[in-house]
Image: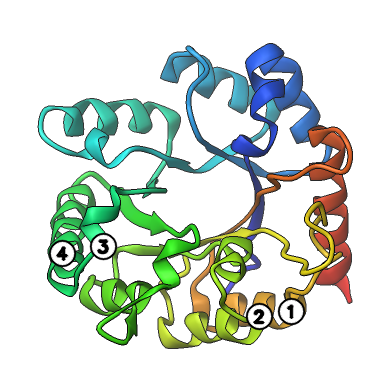
């Protein structure tokens, strides 16, 4: 398979986007990012986003959207917006804790995602779920993450966030195991560093086993996009995400 492309989750530079949307996207493109993942629209229309990104040669790797935007009457509006963007991947980054509180609730939530995946398939789109740290707690002796992804159809993207998983008590080796356990499900992944000694580490400066992770994504993960995300800052956010892509490219070349 072809090498995954590299995108930036724009939440990493959210304050910059709020203040100087155009300049921020221009800076991201100049760093060598091939795409972006949206998390909010900064009061711009889908047409404005598409024009700006096309001008910069950036693709939309996906978007983080609330679950409610895929339910009821909101479903059609969301699909129309993202068709204009040219975005296929509609990823839910958080759901209310009660939807994961019991095995029965987790299975009911998985059923909902399966139904959404079927509806979106007809539109040429996919849904998925992105972890924070709580998903690695256990219910009836089993990780919430495993209960959920065992119960969802292959079309539901497993957007594994490496740093969030490790903050949830998962080891670097266990992060690797998720790719092995759910082959073909990691269509997009979040590359976020974790360090036990430096909470502001950028990609390549911490405890994550990046070479092994990338090899698994490329051999069995089905990964199309590596999405860099940085949420803690030793430097200004734009400098941090520039260091992240520079370090990632070095790791990929080794």
| Nearest to the observer: residue 228 or residue 133 | 133
Which residue is identified by label 2?
Answer: 172
Which of the two discs, 1 and 4, labels the residue nearer the N terminus? 4
Which residue is identified by label 3?
Answer: 100
Which residue is identified by label 1?
Answer: 209
Which residue is identified by label 4?
Answer: 105
Measuring 85% from the left and 33% from the top, which residue is drawn there? Answer: 236
Task: Say left or right for 119 vs 53.
Answer: left
**Real-space Cα distance between discs 3 and 1?**
29 Å
Callout in the foreground (3, 1): 3
Measuring 84% from the left and 60% from the top, which residue is drawn there? Answer: 198
**Real-space Cα distance between discs 3 and 2?**
24 Å
Dot 3 falls on a residue whose secondary structure is: helix
Task: Say left or right for 141 vs 220.
Answer: left
Which of the two discs, 3 and 2, labels the residue nearer the N terminus? 3
Which of the two discs, 2 and 4, labels the residue nearer the N terminus? 4
Q: Are marks 3 and 4 in contact (CB under 8 Å)?
A: yes
């Amino acid at each position: 398979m072809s090498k995954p492309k590299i995108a930036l989750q724009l939440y990493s530079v959210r304050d910059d986007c709020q203040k100087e949307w155009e300049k921020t996207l221009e800076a991201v493109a100049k760093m060598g990012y091939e795409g972006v993942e949206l998390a909010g629209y900064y009061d711009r229309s889908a047409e404005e986003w598409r024009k700006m990104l096309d001008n910069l040669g950036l693709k939309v790797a996906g978007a983080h959207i609330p679950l409610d935007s895929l339910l009821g009457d909101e479903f059609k509006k969301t699909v129309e917006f993202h068709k204009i963007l040219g975005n296929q991947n509609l990823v839910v980054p958080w759901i209310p804790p009660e939807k994961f509180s019991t095995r029965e609730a987790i299975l009911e939530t998985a059923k909902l995602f399966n139904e959404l995946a079927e509806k979106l398939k007809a539109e040429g789109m996919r849904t998925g779920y992105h972890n924070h740290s709580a998903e690695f707690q256990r219910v009836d002796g089993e990780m919430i993450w495993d209960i959920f992804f065992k119960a969802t159809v292959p079309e539901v993207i497993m957007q594994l966030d490496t740093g969030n998983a490790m903050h949830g008590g998962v080891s670097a080796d266990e992060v690797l195991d998720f790719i092995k356990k759910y082959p073909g499900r990691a269509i997009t992944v979040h590359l976020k560093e974790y360090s036990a000694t430096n909470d502001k580490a950028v990609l390549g400066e911490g405890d994550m086993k990046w070479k092994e992770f990338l090899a698994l994504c490329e051999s069995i993960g089905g990964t199309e996009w590596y999405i860099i995300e940085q949420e803690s800052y030793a430097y200004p956010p734009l400098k941090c995400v520039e260091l992240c892509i520079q370090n990632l490219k070095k790791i990929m070349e080794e």
